[in-house]
Image: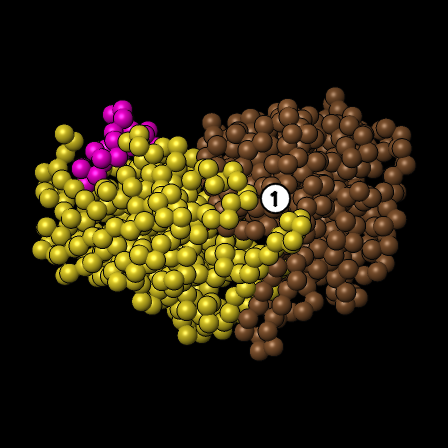
Chain colours: A yellow, B brown
Amino acid sequence: MKLNIAVLPGDGIGPEVIVQAVKVLKAIAMEFNHIFTFETGLVGASAIDKTGDPLPEETISICENADAVLFGAIGDTKYDIDPNAEIRPEQGLLGLRKVLDLFTNIRPVIAYEDLLNKSSLKKKQIKDTDILIYRELTSGIYFGEKKISEDGNTASDVCKYTRFEIERIAHLAFKAAQSRKRKLTLVDKANVLASSRLWRKVVQELAPQYSDVKLNYLYVDNAAMELIINPRQFDVILTENMFGDILSEEASVIVGSIGLLASASIGDKHAMFEPIHGAYTKAANKGIANPIASILSAAMLLDHFELHEEADLIREGVDKSLQLHITTPDLNTKYGHITTTKVGDFIEDFINNPEETNLN
Amino acid sequence: MKLNIAVLPGDGIGPEVIVQAVKVLKAIAMEFNHIFTFETGLVGASAIDKTGDPLPEETISICENADAVLFGAIGDTKYDIDPNAEIRPEQGLLGLRKVLDLFTNIRPVIAYEDLLNKSSLKKKQIKDTDILIYRELTSGIYFGEKKISEDGNTASDVCKYTRFEIERIAHLAFKAAQSRKRKLTLVDKANVLASSRLWRKVVQELAPQYSDVKLNYLYVDNAAMELIINPRQFDVILTENMFGDILSEEASVIVGSIGLLASASIGDKHAMFEPIHGAYTKAANKGIANPIASILSAAMLLDHFELHEEADLIREGVDKSLQLHITTPDLNTKYGHITTTKVGDFIEDFINNPEETNLN
Ligand SMILES: CC(C)[C@H](C(=O)O)[C@@H](O)C(=O)O
Ligand SMILES: CC(C)[C@H](C(=O)O)[C@@H](O)C(=O)O
């Protein structure tokens, strides 16, 4: 297969981790005789520094012409402490999601057997957890109208949803549940929000089309608790943009490190693959960033093109690295400091030679 | 002291737990020679059933004329599954918060030594956690304009904040931090929301007035993770309405049961005290509801009137009950099923006779 992949390293640890993901994809191409080409674009704070724009036109066209986008991370502490900044790195990521119409963000939350001890949660609590979070990604309060009064003393954001926006992601979530444990949990705040009541109404109306899926509802506050005290109750979680942002980062505690969570952002025409962690500026250029979220995002990219064998091989490599404790310091490796690059190298070697790879 | 207390049992387990709180307050009045009078009002689903209105005028006037309000719980599953219901139990609670202008909701999150084993989190993770969450309670997306298009296919909610609304709660949170570990964490989503940027700006501007308090910021998604992996980093958390709702219920996992979390909702003229748990209709009338959140809310009521010795005695009674495993099933008591009433009785007995109370 020929795949033209846009690579957007972004900020902070983004560039370091994405190098590992690209390396792994190249190894896959070699092993399976695919042709993957890569084209790099600027985005986020690094794009602002070079062009003044967090999402330069050129980056958009690279992405629009690619088969898929591989995204690193975005953000910079210097903007975080300035609430008046008008140009912000995050506009690059949000703009990209909107322009490419990536309305569905899929975030798997899996408790790895080899990492059960790393979680803040008790082992018996999380064992066998396997959740797929479907987060709406191009609407809601992220993209609703924003207003600031002239005197700067009043500010507002609108959370708006349409039936169309809810239906398209809900269909995907129902279908995902059908191929899994057939349980779909809609998370909303329908006891307070009009937009949530629309979610509940629309999803309820679609349910008869998926009669083999058991649909239930949770208020977001309650879901934030249930996710920790009983994560195994969940199969597919469907939710709006902001709630999905909060719950998916929270869910990283089940997995043991946010450095392990990958995601796919899917639209009708385009698809982007990104770790859920941020730019983590403090950790940049120290060789301590965990590349696995980025590498697993590359695996999700391959799955998207039905290259499941290839994706599985990457995941096996990741499993093996975890099993052998070839991990960055966020997972408290037994062997002292194993670098970002070394973890990538190990998974690359595994792909080249699955039978023989070991710690070297 | 003479206190006239409005009692609003509400729905589900509300009536059962509030009876225990009132019992405990009566014991305190007796021991300390106070005169507490109680007047009961209807609210929520039970008010709808009887009057058609989740917040009858009579209830409002009872509350306005009281020194403080003791609130049970609100909600009913029959409304939860009907996204079209126009009259909803929650309007009673939200209406009350608004009418009484209870703009600050204070939610303590404390890891009880005797309960460290009950949490889903590892003991070493949560030991010594002592957080005070300051949640804005009368504005934000809860109270912003709600719109539904004529065809019912578009719905929106507005999250709006003014400088005034942020300043008044921020001052209280800074002051609380001053009397504690002098650390204030503002939780927002300033990388995306205009309203969050206003929060960050206003709080930043107030900070010099509280130069002994260390102010830091967290994005809400990140906070949802940090709350679990490192809860001890927090002293006072300040946040807007919706984020506070989510984070405080999430934080209940640290404590071990949501049945233990009390809260105070404070305004300039009025104050209301309520457990953070909901109506939990399924558990109603079974004698399994944990009354401690409600009893600890009564203790917060006493604190509000500077009756600290009295409040401390209640808390000692609660500690003792936990220590002796005189607890409802949510805490997996060692002695089988101890009822809601029995737990209340024990704490009442303790107040009457602190030295001698034991399991009877
Ligand atoms: C960086 C930020 C704008 C982004 C979001 O809130 O969507 C991130 O937290 C994520 O989850 O991808
Ligand atoms: C019942 C509901 C409206 C309420 C809220 O969201 O504020 C509850 O969850 C709470 O936290 O007090």
Chain ID of residue with mark 1: B
Q: What's the magenta region? A: A326-347
Taking the spot 75% from the left edge, 42% from the top edge, the residue there is B266
| Quadrant in which residue B334 is drawn | top right
The secondary element bearing badge 1 is classed as: helix
Left or right placement of residue A326 versus residue A75 in this view: left
User: Can see residue B140?
Assistant: no
Position in image of residue B72 (x %, y %): 72, 49
Left or right of A74? Residue A358 is: left
Quarter of the image that includes the C terminus of chain A: top left
Residue to which mark 1 is pinned: B199
Q: Is residue A329 magenta?
A: yes
- Report the side of B6 relative to B288 (left or right): right
At label 1, which amino acid type do we have?
Answer: Trp
- Which residue sits furthest top? B355
Q: Is residue A187 magenta?
A: no
